[in-house]
Amino acid sequence: MPAPAPPTSRRSVTGTRRTVAALFLLPALVLLGALVVYPIGYSVVRSFYDQSGDGFAGFDNYRALFTDDGIRTALRNNVVWVVFAPTVATALGLVFAVLTERVRWGTAFKLVVFMPMAISMLAAGIIFRLVYDQDPDKGVANAVWVGVHDTFAQSSAFPKAHPGRESPLEPAGGAFVTRATVGVGDTVALPLVGVAPDVMPDDARPAAAAKPQGDRITGTAWQDFTRGKGVGALNAVDASELGYAGMTIEAVKDGEVVETATAAPDGTFSLSAAADGAHLRLPASNFREPYNGLDWLGPSLVTPAIIGSYIWMWAGFAMVLIAAGLAGMPRELLEAARVDGANEWQVFRRVTVPLLAPVLAVVTVTLMINVLKVFDLVFIIAPGSTQDDANVLALELYRKGFSEDQPGVASAIAVFLLLLVIPVMWFNIRRLRREVRR
């Protein structure tokens, strides 16, 4: 009878003893349990208790997810984030990946686009808080916006101008009108104050007293202010005072504008006899406040503005993954489509995009998981006055847990976020495994 074979130790598929493998994995498993499993389990349990943690609250904390105004706003904003941020970032990544394949400096372009990934969300938030500053002299976004606006609609140089003491002008709905009518041969004084000398138009010259003309109406519009106490005559042109270059003067008769004039660099203007018997009006357009750009961090634009900063960071991530998928695409299919007469747009839409569909799905789903947890950008970029309008679930979790001392509700938000992430993560893992099998 043959002797039984000596027992052999069981080995894993890699040839390593399972006991040894388990010992090597033990530290990682302990850390995984301490940093992932235990916090998840504790959050689930804590979500069923009240604020103190002593009384069982049942589903009251979860009910607050749909009744609390702050959480409902956060949930609505999260939906906006999930719909737009991954879609736009993936679309830009696709465009960048396809276009950079055709240029010699494509690698340098990819480096520039991917560079924002090298900085943290905190640093990106600080950068874009400055980019979106309301002051065009500080915020890049408004500097560009105001520059484009002023190219087509020049702002007034006299936004603070107004009549002084004993002025012949009186207010009229944002404009200023002469108290009395004017006649042919008259010289009209239109003195204003309120414009700082250093912001007067560059082409402004020392004001000149208008000379009378027998068949016309003349006058001067000027800054009736001279530096120094007691210097200068009231409602009279002095040597050091500047004319309102470019000021619009309208002659209004029976409610209708019969003639318009523009002040010369020295503030003088002239009207024909058609203005006889009319009131002179300085229209409100002369005093329009300078365009100061958009309130990027105001209630209506704060969420799109923050999403824009997120796309700036993550479009490079999408581009790199899509470019890797593009590199592995069979080129003969693209050439066959071109030989069959397809133009570049048809090749892109009917061949390139369908072949890249698995990669695009993985990138989009990965970004969806990422935006569900977005916190840093919203917390840093949104000012305190509009943080409620930009609120998201991760930020509301922080506020409930630390600012408002409601750990039960905060735990319920954490569990809710986990439930939202799990299906998306499962879909991503399943797709990745399917790709590996191929």
Image (cartoon, grey):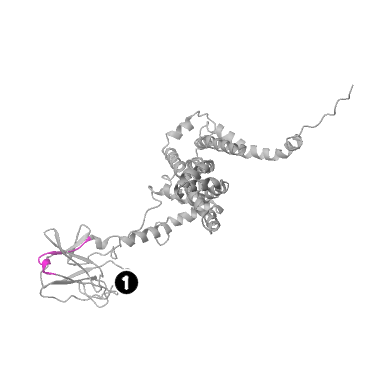
Comparing 359 with 257, the one in front is: 359
Considering the image in quadrants, where does the N terminus appear?
A: top right
The part of the image, by quadrant, that contains residue 208 is bottom left
Q: Is residue 3 above or below residue 323?
A: above
Spot occupied by residue 345 in the image (x, y as percentages of width and height): 45, 48
Answer yes or no: is residue 201 visible: yes
Which residue is at a point 25% across and 78% down the rendered structure image? 239
User: Which element type, helix, strand or loop, lies under badge 1?
Assistant: loop
Farthest residue toward the front?
Answer: 340
* Residue 428 rendering spot, x and y as whole percentages: 55, 38
Which residue, as the protein is rendered here, is positioned at the far top? 1
Q: Which residue is mark 1?
A: 202
Membership of 200 in magenta stretch: no
Where are the magenta residues, as a range? 272-283
Q: Nearer the viewer, residue 399 or 277?
A: 277
Give the percent coordinates (x, y) of residue 359: 54, 43
Q: Position of residue 207 (x, y in %)?
A: 24, 75
* Residue 273 lies within the magenta run: yes
Height in image: 433 above or below 125? above
Give, as a three-letter code, the residue at label 1: Asp
Q: Residue at x 52, y 28 (%)?
A: 56
**Image quarter for residue 362?**
top right
7 displayed left or right of 128? right
